[in-house]
Image (tube, rainbow, N blue to C red):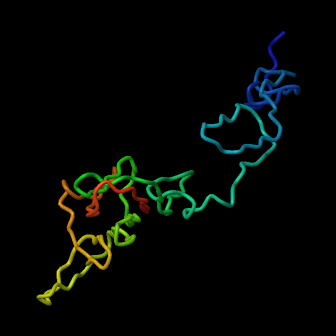
Amino acid sequence: MSQLYVAGTALPSQVLTGTTFSAGTNYNAAGTMPNNGSLNYTPGVAALTIPLGYTSGGTIAGDAKLLAANIIAGKSIFGVAGTANRFVKGTVTSDASGNVTVSGLGFTPLYIMVLSQLTQANGGYSATIVYMSTDKYQTFPFSGVRTDYDYVYYTGNGGSVIGSNLDGTNSYVNGTGFKLKLGANSIACTYIAIG
C-alpha cells in the first residue's frame, strides 16, 4: 500500500500538544507544541524567558512610577533615561588646614553647601561654604574691583565672605567627591551635595 500524502505544510512542533493533524506524510499525527495558556510577567532585575510554544495572550506589568524624574540622571531603566538629581547629606570634619574633603559620592555635584556651628569665647558663629557649578560668585573688595570666584566661604562672627577658585588639587569638585576651603580647622560639619 502506498503512503498517503495530504496537502499542508504543518509539522508536529507547529501543532498544539493534545491535538492531531494531517499534513504532508503526517496522517492523524499528534502535535507537540506546548500550550502555555496566558502568560503574565512583571519585569525585575533578571531577564525573563518566554517559553517555546503557544500562548493565548497575557500581559507584561507596567508601573506608573517608571518616569524619568524618578530615575537618577545618567541611568536608564527599560529605556527610560533618568533626569533626577542625586542628593547626599553627611557629616565631615575639616582638616588642620581648614579644608573639607568628601569622597565616594559617585557623581559630580552641581550644588554643595557645608555648614558648621563654631563655639568661641565671644559667642557662636557659623562657618559656611556655598558652591554652585553653574554660577560664579562676585566679591567687592575695598578697591571696588569685582572678582569672580568658583565658590565662597565665610568664617567668623562679623567676618567677610571670601571667594576662592577650584585648582584641581587643593580644591576640586569631581565625580568622586569634593575638597573645598572652609577656613575653620578641625570642625565638625554637615554637608549637602546635589548632582
Residue 35: x and y, percent? Answer: 81, 32
Residue 12: x and y, percent? Answer: 76, 24
In the image, is residue 115 above or below residue 9?
A: below
In the image, is residue 151 above or below residue 51?
A: below
Position of 143 compared to 137: left or right?
Answer: left
Query: Residue drawn at (29%, 70%), measured in percent from left and top?
Result: 153
Q: Residue furthest front?
A: 121
**Residue 14 sits in quarter:** top right
In the image shown, does 104 or 143 lie closer to the viewer?
143
Position of 14 compared to 28: left or right?
Answer: left
Query: Residue drawn at (39%, 53%), measured in percent from left and top?
Result: 92
**Residue 63 sits in quarter:** bottom right
In the image shown, does 83 or 192 lie closer to the viewer?
192
Residue 119: x and y, percent? Answer: 38, 64
Q: Residue furthest left?
A: 143
Q: Residue furthest bottom?
A: 144
Query: Residue drawn at (79%, 30%), measured in percent from left and top?
Result: 15
Position of the N terminus, as image quadrant, is top right
Position of the C terminus, as image quadrant, is bottom left
In the image shown, does 121 or 151 lie closer to the viewer?
121
Query: Residue drawn at (74%, 26%), measured in percent from left and top?
Result: 13
In the image shown, does 77 or 96 lie closer to the viewer?
96
Q: How many dots with numbers?
A: 0
Position of 49 compared to 137: left or right?
Answer: right
In the image, is residue 128 above or below residue 100?
A: below
